Amino acid sequence: MKPSTHHAPDGSALARELHSRAGVGVAAHVLQGRGLQILRMRVDQPALILVDRGIKTVRPARGASVRGRPGQMLLLRGQQTVDFTNDVAEGEHYEARWLVLDNALLEDAFYRATAARIASVDSPLAPVRLLARVRTDLADAFERGRQALASDPALPDAVARLRVLEVMQWLLEDGLVLRSAPAEMNVSVQVRALIAGRLDHDWTAARVAQALAMSEATLRRRLAAEGASMTALIVDARMASALTLLQATTHPVSRIANAVGYDSPSRFAIRFLERFGFAPTVVRGHERTD
C-alpha cells in the first residue's frame, strides 16, 4: 500500500459551507479556534474524517478510544453515540475534513457483492477505526467525493454517487467493510429523524405525536420508557446541528441560532452552553457575539 503525502487544504478546497446531496452524503470542512471536548454526539451514518491539524480522539460508547493525527483518517460506524476531543497546541486551531456517507449507499448491489467476497456477513466493523497510513488512491477519491457533493448543477447526482462509492471501494481494499447497522425502532430514533429536517419548526409533543400517528400520551409514555423526553431530544438535535454549522461554515451566530429554531441569540447561547459546556463563540476561538 502506497501511503499518501499529507497536504492541508489550500484555496481550492470546498467553500466553508456544508455540502450535501440526498442519498449520497455530506461534506464538511471543520475548523475550531481552540481545543474542545464534545460529549454525546450522535453519529447516524458512517463517516470518514481526515485530520489536517491537531489531534482528534473518538471515544465510542463501547470499545477503546481511537486517536487520529494530521494525515491520518478515522472511520466511524453509523448508529452510535460517541465523545469527541479535538486537541491543539495553544494559539493554534483544529482542522479536519469530513465525508459522511448516506446509508443508502450501503445497499448498492455491486458494493454489497464485493464486500461479501472480502469479509463474512457476520463480521461487524469496529465503532471507530484508524487508518494510520492513508493510501494515495483513497486520499484522492476522498477529496473527489467531497468535491462532488458541492451544489454544482453541471454534475449529475448519479456521478456524485459513483464518486462517493469509489471511496467505499478503496476502503474495501484495506478490508474495511461498511454494513447497515440494525435498524433502531425505538421512538427516540423516529423523533430525531422527524425533527432533523425542520429544526427551525415549532415542534410540540402534539405535533410530533400526530406526525408519528400516535397519541400524545403514548408518545410521552414510550419516550419515558426509553429514558428520553421531547424537550431533551429537540434541544439536543438543535444543538448538534448548531455545533456543526459553527465548525463548518462562516455563518454568524445569530443566523445559526435562527436556523435551528431560536429567535433570540442570547437564549440560543444559554442552551448551547448548557449542552456543551462552552459558548458558541468559543468554537471559533473568540468570545465576541456576532
Image (cartoon, grey):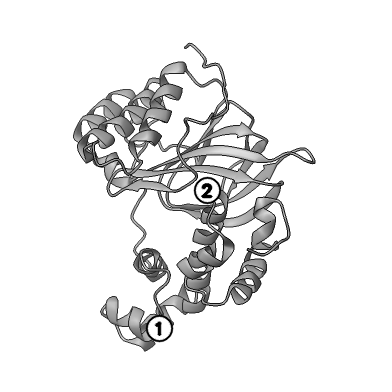
What is the quadrant of residue 52 in the picture?
Answer: top right
Q: Amino acid at mark 1?
A: Ala
Label 1 residue SS = helix
State the separation of the CA atoms marked 2 and 1: 31 Å
Label number found at residue 205: 1
Q: Position of residue 276 (x, y in %)?
A: 65, 62
Label 2 residue SS = helix
Residue receiving disc 2: 248
Quarter of the picture containing the C terminus is bottom right
Q: State whether residue 91 is above or below residue 168.
A: below
Q: Position of residue 85 (x, y in %)?
A: 66, 46
Q: State whether residue 107 is above or below residue 243.
A: above
Task: Tell me which label, 2 or 1, sits earlier in the chain.
Answer: 1
Residue at (37, 23) in percent of width and height: 170
Q: Amino acid at mark 2?
A: Ala
Residue at (64, 30) in percent of width and height: 69
